[in-house]
Amino acid sequence: MHEMSLVQGLIDQLVALAAEHDKQRILTVTVDIGPLSGVAIDSFQFAFDILSKENDLTSGASLTIINSPATYRCVQCGYEESASVRPDQCSKCQENLLIPEGGDAITLNQVELE
Ligand SMILES: [Zn+2]
């Protein structure tokens, strides 16, 4: 489960952030996980629940996961649409070949510290 190492990286990032701002606790964390990042949201949440308890800073922090849609561009007519699941075809011209743009990143969106 590679989500474990991703979450560990996130927690390291949070610990560094708290130290930088001289804070003792992380209250809420919002992470944007793109639909093409290959991350299983459930596993990510599960890993966070386990790993966050191992650190005083993150223990009790609540995690919110946003799943921003990716953009799919039609190679035929250039029409772009946002979707969290790859559309079967272009909704303008029914072309089947759509190129995804973005949606493959994991971004630390917002952190609330105390
Ligand atoms: Zn099209």
Image (cartoon, rainbow, N blue to C red):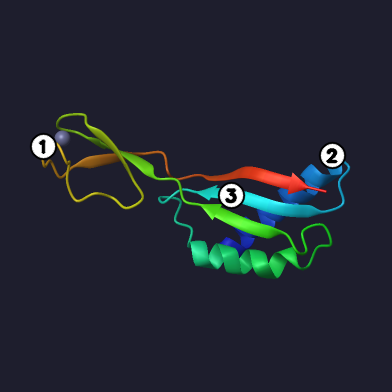
In primary-sequence order, the first of circles 2 and 3 is: 2
Q: As drawn, is 94 to the left or to the right of 52?
A: left
What x and y, as percent, mark residue 63? Answer: 63, 58
Residue on which disc 2 sits: 21
Please name the amino acid that badge 3 sits on. Answer: Val
Q: Indicate left or right for 44 with 56 as reference.
A: left
Task: Find disc 1 in the rendering and name its residue.
Answer: 93
Task: Kindly give the residue lying farthest to the top in the view shown.
Answer: 78
Identified by mark 1, the residue type is Cys
The CA distance from mark 1 to mark 2 is 52 Å
Query: Along the polypeptide, which appears first: circle 3 or circle 1?
Result: 3
Residue flagged by tag 2: what amino acid is it?
His
Characterize the local packing of mark 3: few (<14), some (14-19) or many (20 or more) Cα atoms within 10 angstroms.
some
Q: Secondary structure at mark 1?
A: loop
Q: Regarding mark 2 in the picture, which secondary structure is present there?
A: loop
Report ligand 1 position as a quadrant: top left
Residue 102 position within the rendered picture, expressed as x and y whole percent measured from the top left: 41, 39
Location of residue 47 (image quadrant): bottom right
Rendered residue at 75%/64% (across/down): 60
**Residue 2 showing in the rendered view:** no
Label 1 Cα neighbours within 10 Å, binned few <14 / some 14-19 / many ≥20: few
Identify residue for label 3: 31
**The residue carrying mark 2 has its beta carbon less than 8 Å from ligand 1:** no
